Image (cartoon, coloured by chain):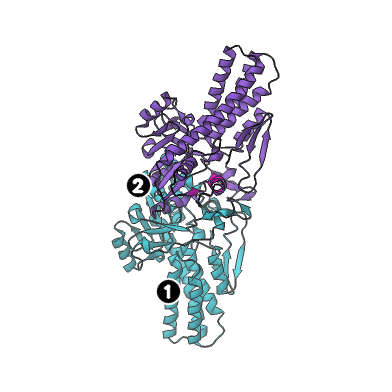
Chain colours: A purple, B cyan
Amino acid sequence: MIIPVKWTDECVEMLDQRLLPTEEVWLKLKTYNDVADGIRDMVIRGAPAIGVSCAYGIALGLKNFVGMNVEDMEEELDYICEVLAKTRPTAINLFWAIDRMKRTFAKAKEEGKNVSEIKQVMIDDAKAIHEEDIESQRLIAQFGGELLEDDSNVLTHCNAGALATGGVWGTALGVIRGAKDQGKKVTVIADETRPYLQGARLTAWELLQDDIPVTLITDNQSGHLMKKGMVQAVVVGSDRIAANGDVANKIGTYMVAVLAKQHGIPFYVAAPMSTVDMNCPTGEEIPIEERDIREITHVKDIQLAPEGISVNNYAFDVTPNEMVDAIITEKGVARKPYVESLRKMAEDN
Amino acid sequence: MIIPVKWTDECVEMLDQRLLPTEEVWLKLKTYNDVADGIRDMVIRGAPAIGVSCAYGIALGLKNFVGMNVEDMEEELDYICEVLAKTRPTAINLFWAIDRMKRTFAKAKEEGKNVSEIKQVMIDDAKAIHEEDIESQRLIAQFGGELLEDDSNVLTHCNAGALATGGVWGTALGVIRGAKDQGKKVTVIADETRPYLQGARLTAWELLQDDIPVTLITDNQSGHLMKKGMVQAVVVGSDRIAANGDVANKIGTYMVAVLAKQHGIPFYVAAPMSTVDMNCPTGEEIPIEERDIREITHVKDIQLAPEGISVNNYAFDVTPNEMVDAIITEKGVARKPYVESLRKMAEDN
């Protein structure tokens, strides 16, 4: 059972995903700045995992607050949230967690709680966010598992597994685990997912741990395999879903969606409601992170491209809602038109 | 001016493309077995370059033949060709060069030439193949250059440049060089082309040498850039073109073709007639090489994926003729239906 982020009484522990699959190292993060660095530097990644980590980062930052005054504590909260908000721009779960933790603080303050009490309230709520995240994935696994046919070879892109969430199930890999729990035979094709290789390093590792058969491919093989009839469904996660169902996810997801459409293969997105941004009308408004070009030009110290080369490193892309056959959340399976189905699910929250 | 393979009086010299872009090392190959190893191990790659290298390998093997008897020499020729034929299965230029060199031998034998004379005939024909290859690319550059619009950002996959051919122009990059020579402003987007990174290592290096502006991307970014309107045309090379215009090329080419179609972007293939296999009715009959999975799981000694992972490493895919807007050869620009336009060009050969 993989849980990539944990709260202890003195720190936030994170499995250092930069070192997988060859080393399993747990980092002890003792300040909110450490947690912010961990998110920015991709010790942990994946929208739901970023949300949980952010909540823990806030709880940790306030736990370390040395003042006695709730107003000062609130100023500290704002500052902590500002630092955390700057780590990764695309994953909405980060901002969702900040909003929720701020609301929790405001409520506790309104109730006249003191600094020490609020510290505990914030820790409790971060833990609750973590538990709810795992429970959401359990439900996503159940609803999504029902969509997969028996004897399916399912293609996934990036890592939307336990490692990308609060743990245990994962979103896209949750759907696969759910289908397996329902007695279906499901095998997985994992895109390696350049440049950061979340598929090769994380999805492959995670599924091997669970004894789910997985075949690794380079991202550019997916079309060939679909043409050969080797893919029965695509399931991916998401970093942010707009109110109209446009889906931001790891770069290359759009490409997979176009290929799935070309071959009549269902394309499913699995994500908790915390990934749905009802304030974002369409995918056009989702900010797309651009990352250091060294991720592409080098693998560790090995130089892959000539010096001075110009490089684009868009970390995400947007798949238009019409290419998405279903969005699987903890509330059930949303279908087109998403502007209605997602609104209903959000109102039901 | 890049010429990746050269005949000297004592050996075949090859620029070791495995070491680019960080090192420029020339290997001296002194036997046909060395040349076969060079092709198999990808010291040189790219269908036209493989064809030229194969011709030189045969000439070198016969030059080293120590007998005095033309019949024995012919047996040696058959053996050399058998070894060379086993190096790479997809690139038809390999088999084309073998056929041509065998015909040249047969003609010289028929004319009653002796061993020493035939050695020179074979060397001369290998050199002629090389010169004709460069001349073909010059014509491809001219015809293809006319297809590109001024101010185009052209996406290419893998390396179909001077490095992939006898030299100087290249096929796909020849088209870009041709457009530039015609006074057009053309910039290039180079897919890195996993797993062997011919785009990052070779195309980027080659275009930097020529001062043609190039931006490197991971293979999975092409859809995103097309959606953003950043790609005006796609030009790729080919390893084998079937008589009906189906195009085998580096894995991922099919994916780019599907994306180009989705976005209404013209998709062009540039290749000499030696790449057109009139004996192969459709792409279904083209053998697709599968290579060592270590190309995907490792970069040099760095392990990217967990031990024991199952991996697919298809080196090529087939793009159906209906997705190809034009095939640019030294005979001109072939259009649909290719079964007719290619046959006319082949008969004209």
> Which numbered dot is residue B99?
1
The residue lying toward the viewer, choosing from A239 and B43, is A239
How packed mark 1 is, by other alpha carbons closer than 10 Å (few <14, some 14-19, many 20 or more), is: some
Q: Do we see residue A322 in this rendering?
A: yes
Mark 2 lies on residue: A264
Q: Secondary structure at mark 1?
A: helix
Region of the chain picked out in magenta, as a range: A189-207
- Magenta stretch: includes residue A204: yes
Q: Secondary structure at mark 2?
A: loop
Question: Which amino acid does the dot numbered 1 rest on?
Answer: Asp
Position of residue A11 measured from the top left corner of the image (x, y, whole percent): 67, 30
Q: Residue at x 60, y 34 (%)?
A: A39
| Chain under callout 1 | B
| Vertical position of residue A273 compared to residue A309: above or below | above
The residue lying toward the viewer, choosing from B318 and A76, is A76
Position of residue A32 measured from the top left corner of the image (x, y, whole percent): 65, 28
- Magenta stretch: includes residue B226: no
Q: Do we see residue B123 in this rendering?
A: no
| Vertical position of residue A203 compared to residue A279: above or below | below
Question: Which amino acid does the dot numbered 2 rest on?
Answer: Gly
